[in-house]
Image (cartoon, rainbow, N blue to C red):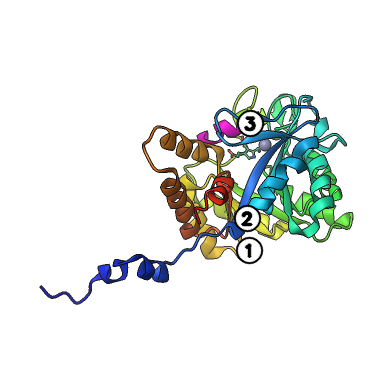
């Protein structure tokens, strides 16, 4: 038989396949998330996220050294605290574990480690909601002020990057304005721009003890039936001063990542979230898939859709096992 074209010619061996591959995953583009708990706490493995721990702030440096030696140099920190109240007091308190960890990390590693911190109230409110409640309702504009205070505290502690994950309207502009006023001109904002109300956040809420005590997050996180609405969020976040825009979750939202990639003037990040991580771990544990194959396929899909940066809990395993 004669064909005018045979695509299999470029699949005939690994050397040829590697040469023509469009995507090359790299740890240079990946951020490892961490949960930092208060000092004096025990290191604790999150049961729904095998291999992921709550790290007590006072032992964080010790723990991080092993990861740094593996090659992890970009991290995102989430705080876990016991005291929660209606004002989210711990969000910018001197004893906030992420602030303590940022100071310690930047003191030791300086610019050799890029430290981002989550900016949201749900880890610190007694309601478990991302915003402040006034008369039982999330008060958008009151929340902005608290977020700006939290952002400022993180910038003062030395964070390189802030990740507002609350989905209040106007938050990027409000935080950017406060940073500028206070002289923090170089603090990067990685906005959770298209953050959808998702069932894939379950394991994270175990890890951070941040599940809402009543109701859900659909009044502020996006409705997964909507794609065009993400473009509206993109426009606002860029106008308001975001340096990087994020899509979250990643795997069920590859269309949104691809949309952003086509039109965003700033880099696009994607968050390979806790539920996506847990699914891969469960399949591997049950012998339903090879973990390396599954993880690399998932992360490649996210990169192929257009993510410049990927936040993933798998990074440590990738480096430890030499998967890339
Ligand atoms: C909190 C926050 C969440 C995640 C990141 N920041 C949970 C939520 O919105 O309920 C989820 C991350 C993950 O699932 O890995 N604003
Ligand atoms: Zn939140």
Q: Is residue 217 visible?
A: no
Please say if 232 is above or below 37.
Answer: below
> What is the x, y in percent for residue 170?
72, 48
Ligand 1 closer than 8 Å to label 3 CB? yes
> What is the x, y in percent for residue 118?
71, 43
Q: Which residues are magenta?
A: 198-204
- The answer to whether 107 appears left or right of 305 in the picture is right
Please say if 258 is above or below 36.
Answer: below
Give the farthest residue toward the top.
214
> What is the x, y in percent for residue 177?
82, 54
Label 3 crowd (10 A; few <14 / some 14-19 / many >=20): many
Q: Quadrant of residue 235?
A: bottom right
Front position in the image: 51 or 22 = 51
Q: Quadrant of residue 111?
A: bottom right
Q: Which mark is residue 51?
A: none
- Quick check: marks 1 and 2 in contact, CB under 8 Å? yes
Residue drawn at the location 55% of the way across and 33% of the way down: 50
Label 2 crowd (10 A; few <14 / some 14-19 / many >=20): many
Residue drawn at the location 80% of the way across and 61% of the way down: 186
Front position in the image: 169 or 252 = 252
Can you identify the residue that label 3 sits on? 207
Judged from the image, the secondary structure of the residue bearing numbered disc 1 is: loop
Judged from the image, the secondary structure of the residue bearing numbered disc 2 is: strand
Can you identify the residue that label 2 sits on? 245
Can you identify the residue that label 1 sits on? 266
Q: How far, Cα to Cα, is label 3 from label 1? A: 31 Å
């Amino acid at each position: 038989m004669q064909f005018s074209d045979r695509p299999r010619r470029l699949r005939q061996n690994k050397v040829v396949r590697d040469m023509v591959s469009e995507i090359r995953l790299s740890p240079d583009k990946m951020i490892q998330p961490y949960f930092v708990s208060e000092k004096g706490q025990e290191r604790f493995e999150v049961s729904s996220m095998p291999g992921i721990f709550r790290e007590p702030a006072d032992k964080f440096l010790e723990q991080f050294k092993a990861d740094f030696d593996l090659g992890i140099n970009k991290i995102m920190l989430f705080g876990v605290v016991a005291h929660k109240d209606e004002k989210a007091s711990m969000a910018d308190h001197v004893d906030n574990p992420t602030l303590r960890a940022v100071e310690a990390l930047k003191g030791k590693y300086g610019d050799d480690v890029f430290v981002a911190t989550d900016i949201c109230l749900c880890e610190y409110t007694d309601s478990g909601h991302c915003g402040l409640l006034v008369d039982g309702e999330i008060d958008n504009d009151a929340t902005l002020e608290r977020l700006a205070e939290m952002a400022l505290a993180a910038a003062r502690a030395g964070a390189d990057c802030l990740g507002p994950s609350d989905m209040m309207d106007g938050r990027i502009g409000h935080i950017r304005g406060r940073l500028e006023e206070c002289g923090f001109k170089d603090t990067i904002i990685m906005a959770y721009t298209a953050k959808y109300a998702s069932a894939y956040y379950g394991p994270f809420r175990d890890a951070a003890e941040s599940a809402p005590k009543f109701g859900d997050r659909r009044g502020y996180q996006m409705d997964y039936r909507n794609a065009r609405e993400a473009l509206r969020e993109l426009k606002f976040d860029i106008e308001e001063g975001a340096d990087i825009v994020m899509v979250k979750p990643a795997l069920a939202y590859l269309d949104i990542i691809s949309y952003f990639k086509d039109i965003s003037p700033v880099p696009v990040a994607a968050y390979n979230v806790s539920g996506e991580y847990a699914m891969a771990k469960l399949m591997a544990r049950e012998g339903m898939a090879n973990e390396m194959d599954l993880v690399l396929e998932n992360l490649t899909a996210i990169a192929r859709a257009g993510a410049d940066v990927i936040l993933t809990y798998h990074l440590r395993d990738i480096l430890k096992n030499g998967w890339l």
